[in-house]
Image (cartoon, grey):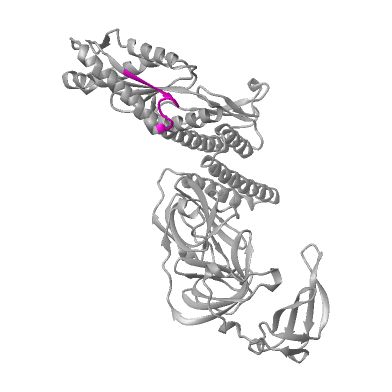
Amino acid sequence: MTSELEVLAGGGVIKVYVNSGDPQILDGLLDAEVEVAGVATASFDGKMQRTGVQLAVPSLNDLKILKRSSTSPWSLPVSEMDEILNDYRVKELSQRVRVHGTITYYQPGSVIVLQSGAKSLWVMTKHEEPLRVGNEAEVTGFPKVHDGFLNLDDGEAKESPVYAPLAPRPVTRSQLTSSKNLFDLVSIEGQVVSQVRESWQDQYVLFSDGQMFSAIYRHPIIQEGHALPMKMVPLGSRVVVSGICILQNSNHFDREVPFDILMRSPDDISVVAGPSLVNVRNLMIVLGLMVVVVMVFGFRSWAIDRRVRRQTAALAVLERQRSHILVDINGARPLADIVEEITQLVSLKLEGAPCWCQILDGARLGVFPADPTALRCIQEEIPARSGPAQGTIFAGLDPAAKPTATETEALSMGAELATLAIETRKLFSDLLHRSEFDLLTDIHNRFFMDQYLDLQIEEARLRAGIFGLIYIDLDKFKQVNDIHGHRVGDLYLQEAAVRMKQQLRPHDLLARVGGDEFAVLVPVVRNRAEVEEIAQRLERSFDAPFAIDGLVLHGAASVGVAMYPEDAPTKDSLLSAADSAMYRAKHAKSREESQDPIGD
C-alpha cells in the first residue's frame, strides 16, 4: 500500500509517495516538519508536460520527523463556514482551519460537502476512507477561493458516530440562480426533457419555470464494466430531484447564473407524475425502435453493420442538436435563428438535403434550392395549438430516390420543434403585451405609463427639457353603464380611445389609467400652449355623437394639463397636478352644463 503526502518545501509543494502497509502510522504528520529521503522524479500531465516534482520513499524509515506540530489540527477551534478566510494570508501560507457540520455529499478522493444550518462548504480532499452521508463530521484544511467560490482545500475528515441527516430544502429555479443556495442540500421539481449516460456520470436535463438545468449523478470509482445501469426516467415525466446546488460560473452576485444539481445517488431523482401521451418522448421511442430494427437487420453483412454504425452516430449528433434547440427555445435567442437551426436538423436527418421553412405571413428561412422544380419536394404544415397552421416546412430530395418513412419522420420532428418555438415566443409576446396594454381599448395601461413617465423625467433632467401630461375623465360615463349596460359601456370606451388617439402625434403616448380615466404624455413640446392645444383637440373629439349598437350617445370629457417641471418635479406630484387640473375643469363644467351629454 502506498500513502501520498504533500510536503511544502522552499520551491513549492512536492508530492511524496511512501511505501507503507499501515496508513494509520502517518497519523499526526499534519503540519509537522519532516526530512524525507527517496528517489526524485518529475511529474507530468497528459501531454507529457512537466508539472512538478515527486519523491518515491521506500519505507517509513526514510521519513524522519524533525518537529511535530505544536497543535493538533483536531484541537483547533471550530470556525464558522462563512468565516474561514478571516486569517487568510497568501496561497501556500493559509492558516489551517477546522469546521464542523453534517456530511451532505461525499466522493472519495475528491469532494466532501458539509452543511450546518443555512451554511455549507465545498471541501477538496484526497480522503478515501468510507464516510456516511448524514453523519456529523469535523474537517480541517486550508481556505481557498476557486472561481470566486469559498472552498476548503487539502481537507482531512474525522467522522462522528452521530447520524443526523439533513432533509433537502425545497426551492424554486429562481432561488437557485441567485447563488444564495450554493453547495446547499436542496430539492427542486421539474420535467425531464433529456437523459444521457456518460462514462463518468449520468445527466438528466430538466425544465422548470421556463428554463433548463441539469441533475448529475457522478459514478463512483469502480472497476470498468461494473457500473450500475443508468436509472431511466420516461421523458416528459414530472420529477423531484435532490442534491447539492453547484453554479456553472463565478458571476454570481450581479445576475442570474446557470446551476446544476449534484445528486448523491440514483434514488435522488423520483417521478411524481408520468409523461403525457403526446410528447417528444413518444417520438424518441419511435426513433429508438427504428434504430433497434435497423441494428437487428444490420448483422446480416459487414456493409449493413457499417451503415448501422453511421446511423447510430448520426442519431447521437441529432439528439445533441435537438437538445441545443430545446435550450435555445427557452432562452433569448432570436426566433429566426432557432427556425434555421431546426431546418439544419431536418437536413442532417435527411443526409444533407436542402430544407427550408416558410412562416405564415413571415420570412422564408433555411436553405432554399436554386431550382426547386428539379427536386422532389415534400412538405409538412407547422400546426398551431388552435387556429390555422403557422407555416410549412419543406425539404428537396433526389427525384430518383424512393420515398421513405425517414422523410416523414424528419419533417414531423421539424414541424413539432417549430411549433414549440413559435408558440413559446407567441406566449412570451402575449404576456408582454398584457403587461403593458389595456386589453379592452388596446392602448397602453397605467403600469406602462408609470414606467414611461419615469424615463421621460430622467431624460428631461438630462437635457433640462420640459414635457406635458394631460389627464382625461369621461363625463357621466357611469350613466352609460347604468342605463345601457356594460357591453355598451365597453364599446363606448373603445370608440373614445380611437377618437383620442387620432388627435395625437406619433410620439405622444395615450394610456388608460382607470375605469373611465385616460392620460396623455406629450414628450416633444416647446411650451404650455402646445400642450393645451392638444388637450382642446382631445376634448373636441367628443363633440360628434357616438353610434353604438343602434344607440346614439352624446359624450363629453374633462381634461387637465400639467407641465414638468413647472407644475411638479416628480412623477407622483405631476400625476396629482394633472388630476387636480382635470377635476377643476370638470367642476367648472358641471356648474355651466344645462343638459345631459348622454343621449339615447
User: In the rendered image, is residue 178 in sight?
Assistant: yes
- In the displayed structure, would residue 5 be above or below residue 373? below
Residue 564 colored in magenta in the image: yes
Asked whether 552 falls inside the magenta stretch, the response is no
Q: Nearer the viewer, residue 17 or 152?
A: 152
User: Residue lying farthest front?
Assistant: 566
The reply to whether residue 436 is in sight is: no
Q: Residue furthest bottom?
A: 61
Rendering quarter of residue 430: top left
Compared with 41, 82 (above or below) is: above
Instruction: Report whether 204 appears left or right of 480.
Output: right
What residue is rendered at 59% in x and 76% in y? Answer: 97
- Judging depth in this view, the residue of 385 and 186 nearest the camera is 186
Residue drawn at (61%, 32%) of the image: 402
Image coordinates for residue 154, horizontal then vertical, percent: 64, 74
Magenta stretch: give its range: 559-571
- Where does residue 37 sit, x and y in percent of width and height? 81, 86
Residue closer to the observer: 388 or 556: 556
Is 586 positioned to the left or the right of 124 in the image? left
In the rendered image, residue 369, in percent from the top left (x then y), is placed at 66, 25
Of residue 146 and residue 487, the one placed in the foreground of this image is 146
Quadrant housing the N terminus: bottom right
Q: Position of residue 399 (x, y in %)?
A: 64, 27
